[in-house]
Image (cartoon, coloured by chain):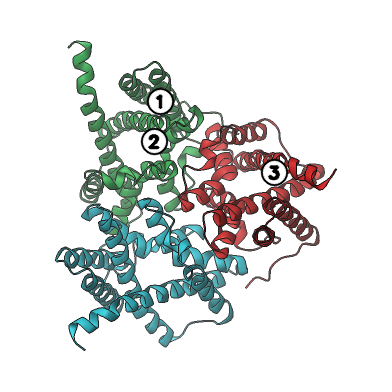
Chain colours: A red, B green, C cyan
Amino acid sequence: MAAAEIESVLPELFRGIDLAGVFLNGVLGGIIARRRRFDAVGFALLAIVSALGGGMLRDTLLQAGTPVALTDPYYLGTALAGAAVAFVIRLDGTWWNRFFILADGMVLGCWAATGAAKTLSLGLGVLPAVLLGVTTAVGGGMIRDVAVGQVPAVFGGNTLYATSAIFASGALIAVDAAGEPELGMLAAIVVGAGLSVLARWRNWRLPEH
Amino acid sequence: MAAAEIESVLPELFRGIDLAGVFLNGVLGGIIARRRRFDAVGFALLAIVSALGGGMLRDTLLQAGTPVALTDPYYLGTALAGAAVAFVIRLDGTWWNRFFILADGMVLGCWAATGAAKTLSLGLGVLPAVLLGVTTAVGGGMIRDVAVGQVPAVFGGNTLYATSAIFASGALIAVDAAGEPELGMLAAIVVGAGLSVLARWRNWRLPEH
Amino acid sequence: MAAAEIESVLPELFRGIDLAGVFLNGVLGGIIARRRRFDAVGFALLAIVSALGGGMLRDTLLQAGTPVALTDPYYLGTALAGAAVAFVIRLDGTWWNRFFILADGMVLGCWAATGAAKTLSLGLGVLPAVLLGVTTAVGGGMIRDVAVGQVPAVFGGNTLYATSAIFASGALIAVDAAGEPELGMLAAIVVGAGLSVLARWRNWRLPEH
């Protein structure tokens, strides 16, 4: 494919990764609900928080209109479909884990880039863009952890999870500044997935205090 | 009374149930503050979160102006009055519990309908309307539970509490679609109170995982 | 200095106290992250929540534009600088504690006044102004406490902390109503610092239930 052709399919690719992320995080919320023996309402609420909480938090902070999680007709249904799958099927095993780590890394990069790009587009600076990139990527998981009484995993002891989101946001910001927003999104997905998968594989962690 | 007369008193009835709900949930926040031996500030904060947290969460998510909880001159004072009553009087006993379950069910239906109706009025879809109906009805209690270090009761082990709010939101949406918003509110209150009281009485629960 | 001269330096003084508060609460978030052995991401997130969470909560509730915490170019960097200091230096000892209690009290008064003044300026009433004054002053600490799995200290067992914020908000509202907003801010800082330092020194507490 020529470069122009590649660029023309990127928006659909990003949309696909985004919705896959909503589905995956809906499943993840459901898996945690299953572990806690919650009922169907608990599955639905944890799936919605996991899948859409980060974007909702970003959009309420930015105050640039009703959160996409509520206006996009696919988001809520996709998150609930994830919850339903986790309700019916018990997902584990080596292949599920390998698939999940890769897919989760791509989603992390995609969401970090979305958050950073939206923040920049509203005229805010680089630091808020990184913060809201990270919020979009890890905020839903943080709220979910707090809701079930756990200290958020991103505070420590994880393998460069929020750190990957910081670098993915940075990749978007750098390439976006060069006038290539779509390539920036692609770069963020590659950086986010690459770094988070590598860190998980090699068990890289930030030094804890 | 003729149908037209009934309809003309409905708005005041709904307003009464709404404010009674703020008061009751202020009392409920205060009862929990008393159990935890909090001081007067803790009573006030838990009462405000319990009574107004769901509506505040709905209104910050909808981003259609400053939350009603702050602009309505009666809400904050009514929630604090509930806290004050719980501070002074120890509320328990069979009759209090019976009264509370019925009143709480009516409020649940009223708030679910309010949240669903407001969401629809902003042009959002049915799924967001149900989500924000449930948020209005149970969101304050969820935030309160998390704030005192408990896993929200609505996640599991309760007697169809959020489920009643789902059905109440659905009742509002159905009757509202038939062009009768006020009857929709009435239907939601009947459905919410009926189902939650029945479920409490018969100890109905969703299957847990 | 003449009264007019004093008034002309007040805005810079308030700005200084405000930014000092962001820094101090960034340090405080970092101190808690150090105690919990979080990594650098945990330090940064707790610092941001501690230092900017109250103002963010106020601004999302007021819905009068993107939170100052994101639009002001100094806030995020200052909070992160506080986290960095706490990461590198272990802050304790009698003199640090004495300095901290006084500085924290001034910040508490300054933030309570800022929140109350902003609420009044949007045409809201006295009760919401007090609520959002207290939210600005103690909201960040509350969210931080909940995030690390603790019941917020302001609910009980503290030495008139939120109470000092209530009185500081009240001082701003009273002096502002007399047509002197800048003196109101000054009064709030004096009242907030005075009452909270005095309460800490004399171990004054609200009666617990």
Mark 3, Cα crowd under 10 Å, few <14 / some 14-19 / many 20+, is many
Q: What residue is pinned by disc 2?
A: B137
Q: Where is residue B44 in the image (x, y as percent from the top left)?
A: 28, 53
Q: Residue B29 carries which label?
A: none
- Are callouts 1 and 2 both on one chain? yes
Quarter of the image for residue B172 reads: top left
Mark 3 and mark 1, same subunit?
A: no
Which residue type carries mark 3? Phe
Query: Which of the 4 image quarters holds residue A4?
Result: top right
The answer to whether C88 is drawn above or below residue B173 in the figure is: below
Marks 3,2: beta carbons within 8 A: no
Q: Residue at x 40, y 61 (%)?
A: C55
Q: Are marks 1 and 2 in contact (CB under 8 Å)?
A: yes
**Circle 1 residues within 10 Å: few <14, some 14–19, many ≥20:** many
Q: Residue at x 50, y 68 (%)?
A: C76
Give x and y (percent) for residue B29. Answer: 32, 47
Q: Earlier in the sequence, mark 1 or mark 2?
A: 2
Q: Label 3: which residue?
A: A14
- Give the amino acid at mark 1: Ala
- Which residue occupies the foreground of this view, B167 or B42? B167
Q: Which residue is drawn at 42% across and 29% down?
A: B120
Residue that numbered label 1 is attached to: B168
In the image, taking residue C156 as reference, residue A169 lies left or right, namely right
**3 vs 2, front mark:** 3
Q: Quadrant of the N terminus of chain B?
A: top left
Q: Which quadrant of the figure has residue A13?
A: top right
Question: Compared with residue C131, is residue C101 higher up or lower down, i.e. above or below?
Answer: below
Instruction: Residue at the far left: name it.
Output: C178
